[in-house]
Image (cartoon, coloured by chain):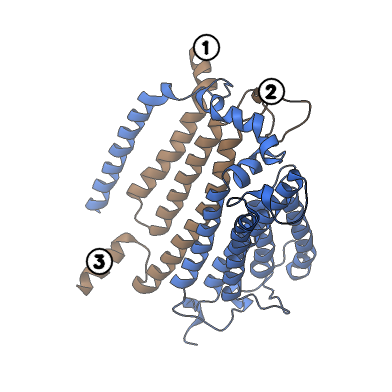
Amino acid sequence: MTVINDFLAERGIYMLTMILFFLGVYGIATCGNYMKKLICMNIMQVAVIFFFLCLGQKLGGTIPVTVTDIVLAEEYINPLPHALMLTAIVVSLGTTGVGLALLMRIKDKYGSMEEEDVIKKEEKEL
Amino acid sequence: MKKKKIGQAVGVILVIAMVCVFWQLIDYLPVIGDPKSAPNSHVSKMYIVDGPSMTHSPNLVTGVLADFRGFDTLWETTVMFLAGMAVSMILSDKLKRHWDASIFGEIRTFGGADVKAMIPLIVPFILLYAVYVLFHGEVSLGGGFQAGALIALGYILYAMVAGLTIKTVKVTQHLSICLAALGVFIYALTGILPMFNGGKFLDYGRLPFGAEATAELHTTGILMIEVGVTVCVAATIVTILEAVLERKSLHDGNQ
């Protein structure tokens, strides 16, 4: 049991982010609805953000705001992944907005967001 | 139906193959919480130890975001502005004059509290909190992106939940795109101003404001770009909302 416990404590969180990431991949590969595909893409983005935040963690570290009586670098958690992911979250909001706008146009043109219906209608027009 | 089953099978096989590859590589990943692991040891030590003295910002995340990676954040802000403009351009084929709140159906009351009366009471506090987050972005937790999202949240609550329109200023999508561009402009201007004083792009220590202390100038510079980011992010979110609301939807019929 100690082996499993050690594994979960040391690298268990990677398994959770992996499950989240591949849930998104599976959804994008199999879902027939464009809206669901977009949601799965968002889940993948969240998994990547989790993964980066895991790397910045330190045991016993405090938030990355400098206090005068703490000087050692080991006492603060790594600020780099936080700074990188802060912008990634906001940009993912922008990309989701563009994706939803495109979905609105697809719904207007084809009357449906199901992949099958869109392909069927496209083939009929040709 | 058969095609769909094949697609699902391919998806499952693909996912299993990728899980196997990941499982083989998991031992190369650093141990969680280890202060001596690779991502926590090389450059990050320099950012933590030398960051406060180089950027004069106690919040290390803001120091990295606004000072070390200031050029990167400028283009992130531009990406937000471009996303808002793209949404507005994609949805510009069927504009109506201005949206009315009736597309949300009847306004429901939650447990007796009237939303139309309650939201205008809550929104000022959200905006106050947003300003607090913005001005504390440099000394403690907070920053421009979060403050912009909070301001946009106030607008979304006002417009979408309560179905109210702002009477004094009509916030159309074109106005909010202009505001987002103004945010990017404030950021770029903060970068260009030091160049007139013999500095480099985004060199906050050379801002031509007459102050002698470098720390003061750094604080001013970081605050200026945080204001730019806030304006851009808030205006972009409002643009996306307005672009959707100002479009003739299927429920509107033949107006």
Is B147 or B76 nearer to us in this picture? B76
Q: Position of residue A118 (x, y in %)?
A: 30, 66
Residue ID for mark 1: A2
Q: Give me the chain that's brown.
A: A
Callout 1, which amino acid? Thr
Q: Secondary structure at mark 3?
A: helix
Q: Which residue is mark 3?
A: A120
The residue at 57%/30% (across/down) is: B44
In the image, residue B171 above or below residue B228: below
Instruction: Say whether marks 2 and 3 touch (CB < 8 Å).
Output: no
Residue A72: give its label. Answer: 2
The chain ID associated with circle 3 is: A
Q: Which mark is first along the chain, 3 or 2? A: 2
| Residue B74 point in image, percent of width and height | 55, 54
Furthest toward the bottom, the residue is B255
Mark 1, chain letter? A
Residue B166 to residue B153: above or below: below
> What is the crowding at mark 2: few (fewer than 14 residues within 10 Å), some, or many (at least 20)?
few
The reply to whether label 1 and label 2 mark residues of one chain is: yes
Residue found at x 56% / y 26%: B40
Sequence-wise, which precedes: disc 1 or disc 3? 1
Write down the colour of chain B: blue
| Label 1 residue SS | helix
The foreground one among B148 and B126 is B148
Q: Chain of mark 2?
A: A
